[in-house]
Amino acid sequence: MLENMNTYSFPQSKSVDTYGIVCFSHLRWNFVFQRPQHLLSRFAKTRDVLVIEEPEYHDGAPGFVIDGTDEGVKVAVPHLPLGTAPDQAERILKTLVDELLDSQNIKNYVAWYYTPMMLAWSEHLRPLATVYDCMDELSAFKNAPEELRTREAELFGLADLVFTGGRSLYEVKRERHDAVYCFPSSIDVKHFARALEVDEEPLDQIEIPHPRIGFFGVIDERTDIGLLQEIAELRPDWQFVMIGPVVKISEDDLPRGENIHYLGGKSYDELPDYIAGWDVAMMPFAMNESTRFISPTKTPEYLAAGRPVVSTPIRDVVRPYGEAGLVEIASTASEFADAIQRFLVEDASERQKKANEFLETMSWDKTYQAMSELIDDAIAANAERSASASV
């Protein structure tokens, strides 16, 4: 018997004559507000959205813990008994998912994947359509499961639509499916433009001297901590503000110095308040397999906040931001320092005007609308095929 662990009662369904979304995500909803949150929050305004996260293990019976979010999304976390073997976990999770969808009265829905690893306990489902929003090359990440590539191939076989999080990723995935669409990282301009009007600094940043060079995001194997150390040592008169959780690397390995400040993770709502106090924003990404196909959301976010940006030569930053003269590209500590120094003395008005014009072409709302239209078409095509097959 599976334990009912529901902890949240939901209002009447939003999805009367349309589909809901059941999303399988390796990213915790409350970890960092990024692409999944931007997109699914918009879907949740008009339809039911259920995000199923990776399992947690506890001393108790198997079941789901379900919570609501401020964005109107339902988040379901499966809890499995400690010591559950992997093959047993897959069998339990299949049953749990079926019971979850039944208990939430979810019948007409689109299956939306951020990781192919959840196929093991969801591939038996029969959604109206299947979407793979491939925002990263997960197989290149630290501690990636060996079977991830195999599972991704299976997901390509099941998916009706594949969205990619950037141009570089699109170029390596487009030959693997007939319906691959490039949707690079977008921007909520209004949210980050708040940084231009902030007049009261956060307490944990206010005492840090200027000039301040800032970064926000997950600090992990994609961050070139060696480069950060070199820049900080090269310019001890500059202050480096690092905002974000440390994941998959040891905090003991982080560079330390009087001019390096780790402020921890901050909420999406707080970010403009911190960026407002920076003189320059930086993206010291490592140049390795884990960053080969990334399309950093923070690039347009920094620009919308009015900050000049220096980045290592990440392909999806070089093209289009570097080529358009919106971001300075630097590979070494000295190049970073030179670029930052130029920004510290520049007249920023022309750069900001150019950035604003560029950002007018981007928005999560436009991305959401384009994805919705493709999904509608995929559902209609599947329905037509099903009707033809039944004749």
Image (cartoon, grey):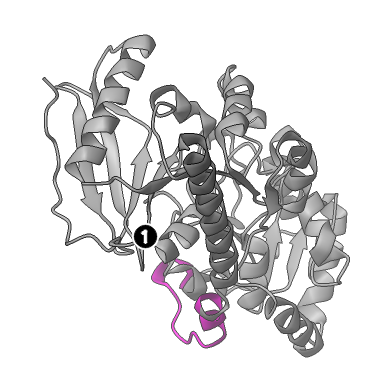
Which quadrant holds residue 322?
bottom right
Nearest the eye: 31 or 54: 54
Image x and y of residue 161, in percent: 60, 46
**Residue under the image location 55 percent in, 68 percent down:** 369
Q: Quadrant of the N terminus?
A: top left
- Residue 13, compared with residue 227, is above or below; it is below
Q: Which residues are magenta?
A: 191-206
Determine whether 183 is above or below 113 in the image: below
Please name the amino acid that badge 1 sits on. Answer: Thr
**Considering depth in this image, is 371 or 212 the residue closer to the camera?**
371
Q: Is residue 33 above or below residue 358?
A: above
Residue tagged by mark 1? 18
Residue for point 69% across, 52% down: 181
The overriding secondary structure of the stretch rendered in magenta is: helix
| Residue 113 visible to an observer of this rendering | no
How packed is label 1: few (under 14 Cα within 10 Å), some, or many (20 or more)? few
Left or right: where does residue 203 sit relative to residue 339?
left
Q: Position of residue 13 (x, y in %)?
A: 23, 60
Residue 139 drawn at (x, y percent): 64, 28
Image coordinates for residue 140, horizontal then vertical, percent: 67, 30
